Image (cartoon, rainbow, N blue to C red):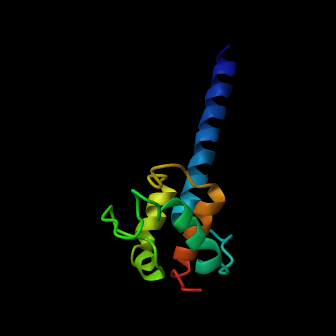
Amino acid sequence: MIKKIAGVLTGGIMLLYGCYNDKEELLYGNDTCDGNTSFAMNVNPIIQANCAIPDCHAAGSSNGPGALTTYGQIKNVAVEIKSAVVSRFMPKNGSLTESQIKTISCWVDAGAPNN
């Protein structure tokens, strides 16, 4: 009986540790970013579909960092955007996929280029 309990506890700890490491890679970056993430093709569509919407960060918004409709507005708060999406604090009205979070993270880690 004790062996079964120890096995379950060990498995649970391993599972939790594995999940923590996955999140840490998103927070601090990893070697899987290829440097080819495009603002225009990859990042901006995610922001426009999930953030720059009415009652959130559309034109004229005063929520948080304000509007996120142009490259300049997004670039100025890129680090904050990364932090908010990695922590899953944003977007408020839904969630991003792991792939979308990675795309934003890689773009920010590359210096948030206007490409």
Residue for point 63% across, 73% down: 42
Q: Is residue 6 above or below residue 39?
A: above
**Does residue 36 appear in the picture of this structure?**
yes
Residue lying at the far top of the rendered structure? 1
Q: Position of residue 6 (x, y in %)?
A: 64, 25
Give whichever of 59, 37 is nearer the camera.
Answer: 59
Q: Is residue 71 above or below residue 87?
A: below
Q: Is residue 9 above or below residue 49?
A: above
Residue for point 58% across, 65% down: 46
Residue for point 49% across, 52% down: 88
Q: How many marks do you count on the picture?
A: 0
**Does residue 38 appear in the picture of this structure?**
no
Asked where in the image residue 49 lies, by quadrant, the reply is bottom right
Q: Position of residue 70 (x, y in %)?
A: 46, 78
Give whichever of 52, 31 is nearer the camera.
Answer: 52
Q: Position of residue 40 (x, y in %)?
A: 60, 79
Residue for point 53% across, 49% down: 94
Say which quadrant the C terminus sits in.
Answer: bottom right
Say which quadrant the N terminus sits in.
Answer: top right
Q: Position of residue 91 (x, y in %)?
A: 48, 55
